[in-house]
């Protein structure tokens, strides 16, 4: 169970620039830490984030190990029409998590 | 920048403490300040925004667990409805049935065993942290109000003893840092008053949410004392002393701490 | 014993002695064992942008003056751009001269963003100036940087 939190306004005026926030529970293990027995803890990170507005990619990010645990992103998009915003994370092994929010544009 | 080792930093602190004799007076109630006030504005902003504060990832998970059933067991919500507003601010508290002092984690596990016929959750498991954070978050802004009389009195005395007893290779008590030297610098940190009002808290150092007992274990390890096990009765007694010491301070869980 | 200077390898400054004494502790306490250099930042930039000219300006980074913990430092970047079809930011790349890997993150955006601003939280292996390079739709490259002091926690637990 991976916890995700999204902040998307419920409504916006057409062409308004809206603020989006996305938070996901993930250790972002850098691969540089060692365990209590001195063993290297293998890297385990999310490498890709995408935000789709009605299926169209409007923002994306590539992450390296320097992105902090439980990755947080705040970015903007222009409200063009009522629709669904999908937020999608993919880790280095190809596993994905996603969540959606709907936006009503007046 | 010279990178002082923790050992040297503590040696410096011990030296700083030594000229003035150690007192045995409690922190005056008028001086009580939340750990929040020792954070930078940026870290405070991270705590205040529930969409930036990663602690809420656990709160959400806890809310889902609270409302869901495992097998035939009733959910937490089937007894407690929407939740337990204000309850966390009164813990640790004496359990009427057994006479034991329970902290919030202990109460949740006892509920599971007694009413839900479910096994206790491990300390620091994501599920126990999530449930604890969810219940604690429902007391956010509520002043801590624990009872230290009656059956709780001996626990309070034990906890206070733990707080004032020097321990570990550094021979330091909780009191020496958090009563006598709070507000002073120790390496890059300002020494806080050591309140538990933000726990379970998301510590930057942990990169995760953790319990107050995890924090106390770090303190014990920090003075090079043997940390006690999670849920050790001595830690629950200490938790009661810490809460009573912070009586009146608003709950902040899930807080951000360094 | 004749009075002569000690050979170089045994002549320690006080600071070096402190480092020696604390050496094992420091190795265990340092979360990031290797560090990039400004050259690594150049190499990472070249990989992304070739040898195109990067000009100073239009890029504003925000970092706290003092980062309380290098594991999680609030970071934001904003590019001065109208974000129209004709004039917008295509991507923003973040670089660290002192982390194990120079590349921190890369954000792709376009006119749909409306505003070229991104905030996140990053890990910093020490006090440094973080750099951002923005690529515009006309192919021009702009950069900015911000400095932060990364402090060490008082009670580092060594396990």
Image: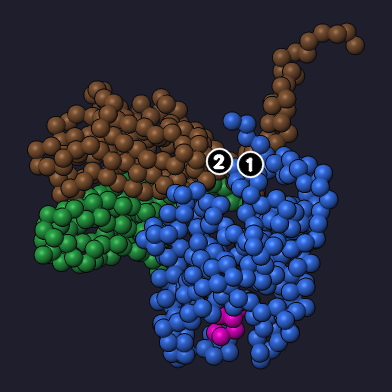
Identify the subunit bearing mark 2: C
Q: Secondary structure at mark 2?
A: loop
Judge from the rendering whether residue C123 lies leftward or rightward of residue A7; answer left or right.
Answer: right
Point out the residue furthest to the front here.
Answer: B30
Q: Is residue B134 left or right of residue B164?
A: left
Please report contact status of discs 2 and 1: CB closer than 8 Å, yes or no. yes
Give percent across and percent down for residue C133.
Answer: 29, 33
Taking the view exactly as shown, the residue that stands out farthest to the right is C1
Residue where numbered disc 1 is placed: B187
At 75% across and 79% down in the image, what residue appears? B153
Q: Which residue is label 2 attached to?
A: C151
Within the image, what quadrant is residue C60 found in? Answer: top left
Tell me if residue A57 comes above or below residue B158 in the rendering: above
Q: Which mark is residue B113?
A: none
- Which sits in the foreground, A5 or C42? A5
Residue placed at 41% from the left, 24% from the top? C39
Q: Nearer the viewer, residue C61 or A102?
A: C61
Which segment is the magenta one?
Answer: B105-112
Q: Are marks 2 and 1 on the same chain?
A: no
Judged left or right of residue B155, residue C75 is left
Indicate the colouring scheme: by chain
Q: Residues within 10 Å of mark 1 (few under 14, many from 20)?
A: many
Locate the C terminus of chain A by quadrant: bottom left
Label the brown chain with its letter. C
* Residue A11 point in image, percent of width and height: 18, 65
| Tint of chain B | blue
Residue beneath the point at 26% across and 62% down: A8
Distance from disc 2 to disc 1, alpha carbons, whole Å, reads 8 Å
Image hue for chain A: green
Dot 1: chain letter: B
């Amino acid at each position: 169970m991976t916890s995700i939190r999204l902040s998307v306004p419920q409504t916006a005026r057409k062409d308004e620039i809206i603020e989006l926030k996305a938070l996901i529970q993930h250790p972002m293990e850098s691969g540089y830490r060692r365990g209590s027995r001195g063993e290297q803890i293998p890297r385990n990170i999310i490498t890709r984030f995408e935000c789709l507005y009605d299926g169209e990619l409007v923002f994306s990010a590539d992450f390296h190990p320097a992105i902090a645990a439980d990755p947080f992103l705040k970015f903007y998009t222009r409200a063009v029409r009522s629709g669904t915003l999908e937020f999608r994370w993919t880790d280095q092994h190809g596993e994905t998590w996603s969540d959606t929010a709907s936006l009503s544009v007046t | 920048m010279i990178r002082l080792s923790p050992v040297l930093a503590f040696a410096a602190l011990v030296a700083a403490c030594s000229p003035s004799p150690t007192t045995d007076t409690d922190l005056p109630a008028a001086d009580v300040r939340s750990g929040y006030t020792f954070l930078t504005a940026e870290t405070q902003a991270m705590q205040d925004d529930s969409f930036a504060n990663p602690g809420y990832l656990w709160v959400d998970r806890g809310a889902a667990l609270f409302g869901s059933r495992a097998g035939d067991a009733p959910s937490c919500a089937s007894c407690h409805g929407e939740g337990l507003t204000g309850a966390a601010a009164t813990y640790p508290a004496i359990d009427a049935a057994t006479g034991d002092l329970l902290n919030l984690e202990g109460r949740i596990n006892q509920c599971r065993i007694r009413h839900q016929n479910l096994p206790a959750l491990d300390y620091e498991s994501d599920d126990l942290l999530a449930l604890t954070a969810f219940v604690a978050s429902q007391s956010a802004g509520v002043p801590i109000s624990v009872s230290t009389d009656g059956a709780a009195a001996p626990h309070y005395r034990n906890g206070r003893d733990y707080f004032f007893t020097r321990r570990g290779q550094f021979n330091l008590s909780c009191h020496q840092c958090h009563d006598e030297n709070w507000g002073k610098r120790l390496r890059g940190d300002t020494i806080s008053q050591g309140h538990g009002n933000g726990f379970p808290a998301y510590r930057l150092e942990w990169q995760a949410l953790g319990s107050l007992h995890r924090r106390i274990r770090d303190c014990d390890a920090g003075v090079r004392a043997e940390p006690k096990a999670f849920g050790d009765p001595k830690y629950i007694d200490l938790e009661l002393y810490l809460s009573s010491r912070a009586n009146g301070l608003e709950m902040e869980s899930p807080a951000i701490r360094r | 014993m004749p009075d002569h200077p000690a050979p170089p390898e045994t002549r320690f400054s006080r600071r070096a002695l402190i480092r020696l004494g604390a050496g094992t502790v420091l190795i265990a306490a340092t979360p990031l064992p290797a560090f990039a250099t400004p050259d690594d930042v150049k190499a990472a930039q070249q990989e992304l942008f070739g040898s195109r000219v990067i000009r100073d300006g239009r890029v504003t980074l925000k970092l706290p003056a003092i980062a309380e913990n290098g594991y999680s430092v609030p970071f934001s970047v904003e590019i001065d751009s109208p974000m129209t079809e004709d004039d917008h930011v295509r991507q923003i790349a973040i670089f660290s001269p002192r982390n194990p890997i120079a590349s921190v993150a890369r954000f792709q955006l376009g006119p749909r963003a409306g505003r070229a601003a991104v905030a996140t939280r990053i890990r910093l292996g020490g006090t440094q100036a973080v750099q951002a390079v923005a690529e515009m739709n006309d192919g021009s490259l702009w950069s900015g940087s911000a400095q932060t002091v990364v402090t060490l926690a008082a009670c580092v637990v060594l396990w």
